[in-house]
Amino acid sequence: MSVVSRAARRHRRSNAEELSVTAFMNLMVVLVPFLLITAVFSRLTILELNLPSSSQVVPETAQAINLEIHVREGRIEVADRGTGLLRALPDVEGRRDFAGLGHFLADEIKPRFPELISATVLLEPQIPYDTVVQVMDIVRVRAVVEDGRQIQQELFPDISIGDAPALKGGK
C-alpha cells in the first residue's frame, strides 16, 4: 500500500505545478503599446475607378468632350474620344512629363469645360504601376496655393481606367 501511495503523491505533485505566465505578460505589456502606436502611421487609400464604356450617355449641357489620357511607351497623349489627339507630351530625358500634363489639364482643358468631371486613363500593358498612380493623381486634383495655404483643386475626379488602343501601323 505504501508503494501505491508514493506513486499517487508523485502524480499529484506533477499536476499541482502551475504554469508561469509572467514572461508572457511582460511581452504583452511591451508589445501592445508598440503595435497601437505604429497602427496610427499606417494609412489605406482607396480610389474608386470605373471601367470605360463605349456607349456612355452624356448630356450635351454637361460636357462636349470625352477626355482620354493615353499613357504609352515614350509619351503621354491627351485626346478627345470624338475628335482625336489634343496634345502629345513626349518623355523628357527619359522621364514622363507629368508637369506638362498637369498644366495642360488644369490650364487649358478645365477652363474650357468647367463642368467636366470624368476622364478615362488608357494604358499600354508594360506601363509601370507607379506611373499609373502618378497619372491618376494628376488627372484627379491639382495643388493650388490660396491665401498662403496649399489646397487641392478638383480637376477630373471621376476616373475610368482601361487598355490603350493599339496604334495604327502596329506600333
Image (spheres, rainbow, N blue to C red):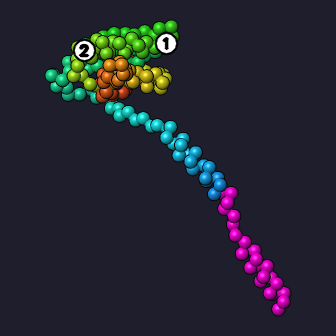
Residue count near mark 2 (Cα–Cα under 10 Å), binned few <14, some 14–19, many ≥20: few
**Answer yes or no: do the residues labelled 1 and 2 have beta carbons within 8 Å?**
no
Residue 111: mark in rendering: 2
Q: Main secondary structure of the magenta part?
A: helix
| Front-lying residue, 99 or 42 | 42
Residue 95: mark in rendering: 1
Residue 34 location in percent, x, y? 58, 45
Inspect the magenta stretch and tell me whether residue 2 lies in it: yes
Q: Is residue 58 left or right of residue 79?
A: left
Residue 163 location in percent, x, y? 38, 24
Residue 139 falls in which quadrant of the image? Answer: top left
Residue 96 location in percent, x, y? 46, 14
Instruction: Examine the rendered structure and indicate whether residue 49 appears above or below residue 77.
Output: below
| Residue found farthest to the left | 61
Q: Is residue 105 left or right of residue 135?
A: left
Asked which secondary structure carries label 2, the reply is helix
| Front-lying residue, 14 or 55 | 14
Q: Which residues are magenta?
A: 1-24
